[in-house]
């Protein structure tokens, strides 16, 4: 294979109770990356559309992720990389993770698959760190593996892919203001009380159990975040109202998507997810803030080759 075109899906990280460990992969929203093998060694970012991002590989999420993979392999040829961004930077639905995951997946294919998808998470995280200032895997893991993923541990990296109930739908609203992940991480308190931790890990365990057993009631009871959401939600216009209305419409729960400003909700069934989307649109139509709304199934495959 001499060249490859890749779909790099958007993702929702944290999912309320799973800060830095839980994420899911979306269908239908994603970037595209085209990679071409070249006789000249090394990597070159030849074109980026849809966002104003640096072409210098060492300053670019995809460039850093690609280089970290090539450091392990050192092939005697190189790669030209084009990135077409459809996911807005700073949107909270894994824009940097899509670039990082897509590029390492594509390189791996062109190199004859020396790494498994789970092994690629490590390289993608190196790129993710350029954007967020920290190596978190809760966007890159679902982008690469699809479905829901749990980062059981970071050292060593231990990623678990979780099947999702078939009727589960995600609704996401992206109010188009930019919140930088690095800044949204800086507002967090490094220490939490034992009481908060107990509530949070109870909910995380409940959510995982609910996903495995298709228990929508348990998923609903578990979608809470008493640690991160109270500190970040004030940066997101209409957050409380959107969450309240989503739940009124029948959503199982709602919260901040990644580090925001996007807000996600999970619903049982397409109809409820669509009602939630309409309610979100109504709320933001009354503001001057441009927005996009997506209703999506969980993407079981993750990053993939397209023609
Ligand atoms: N877990 C990360 C954070 C996700 O919330 O900072 C960023 O998309």
Image: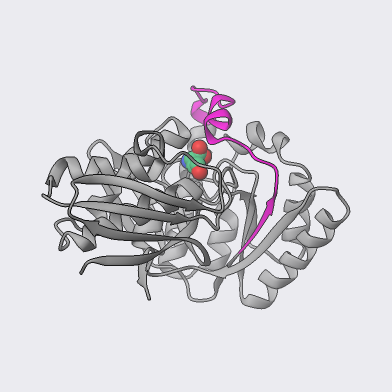
The residue at 50%/58% (across/down) is 10
Question: With respect to residue 269, does 203 lie above or below?
Answer: above
Q: Nearer the viewer, residue 217 or 105?
A: 105
Task: Answer whether residue 281 is visible to the viewer in this image.
Answer: yes
Q: Position of residue 82 (x, y in %)?
A: 40, 55
- Rendering quarter of residue 148: bottom left
Q: Position of residue 208 (x, y in %)?
A: 43, 57
The residue at 26%/41% (across/down) is 67
The residues colored magenta run: 171-195
Count of numbered tags: 0
Whether residue 281 sits left or right of residue 53 in the image: it is right
Q: Position of residue 23 (x, y in %)?
A: 45, 53
**Is-magenta flag for residue 184?**
yes
**Is-magenta flag for residue 44?**
no
Whether residue 207 sits left or right of residue 302 in the image: it is right
Task: Answer whether residue 139 is visible to the viewer in this image.
Answer: no
Q: Which of 3 and 72 is in front in this view?
A: 3
Quadrant for the C terminus in the image: bottom left
Quadrant for the N terminus in the image: bottom left
């Amino acid at each position: 294979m001499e060249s490859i075109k890749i779909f790099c899906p958007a993702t929702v990280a944290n999912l309320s109770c799973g800060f830095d460990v839980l994420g899911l992969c979306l269908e239908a929203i994603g970037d595209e990356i085209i990679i071409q093998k070249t006789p000249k060694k090394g990597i070159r970012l030849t074109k980026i559309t849809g966002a104003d991002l640096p072409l210098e590989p060492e300053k670019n999420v995809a460039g850093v992720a690609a280089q970290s993979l090539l450091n392990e392999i050192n092939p005697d040829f190189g790669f030209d990389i084009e990135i077409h961004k459809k996911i807005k930077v700073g949107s909270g639905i894994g824009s940097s993770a899509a670039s990082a995951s897509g590029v390492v997946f594509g390189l791996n294919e062109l190199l004859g698959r020396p790494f498994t998808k789970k092994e690629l998470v490590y390289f993608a995280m190196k790129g993710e760190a350029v954007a967020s200032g920290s190596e978190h895997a809760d966007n890159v893991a679902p982008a690469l593996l699809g479905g829901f993923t749990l980062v059981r541990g970071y050292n060593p990296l231990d990623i678990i892919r979780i099947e999702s109930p078939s009727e589960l739908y995600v609704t996401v609203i992206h109010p188009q203001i930019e919140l930088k992940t690095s800044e949204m991480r800086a507002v967090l308190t490094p220490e939490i009380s034992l009481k908060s931790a107990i509530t949070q890990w109870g909910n995380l365990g409940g959510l995982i159990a609910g996903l495995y057993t298709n228990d929508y009631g348990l998923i609903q009871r578990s979608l809470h975040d008493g640690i991160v959401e109270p500190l970040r939600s004030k940066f997101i216009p209409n957050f409380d109202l959107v969450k309240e209305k989503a739940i009124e419409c029948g959503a199982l729960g709602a919260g901040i998507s990644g580090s925001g400003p996007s807000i996600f909700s999970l619903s049982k069934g397409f109809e409820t997810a669509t009602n939630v989307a309409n309610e979100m649109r109504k709320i933001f139509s009354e503001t001057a803030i441009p927005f996009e709304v997506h209703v999506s199934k969980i993407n079981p495959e993750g990053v993939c080759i397209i023609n």
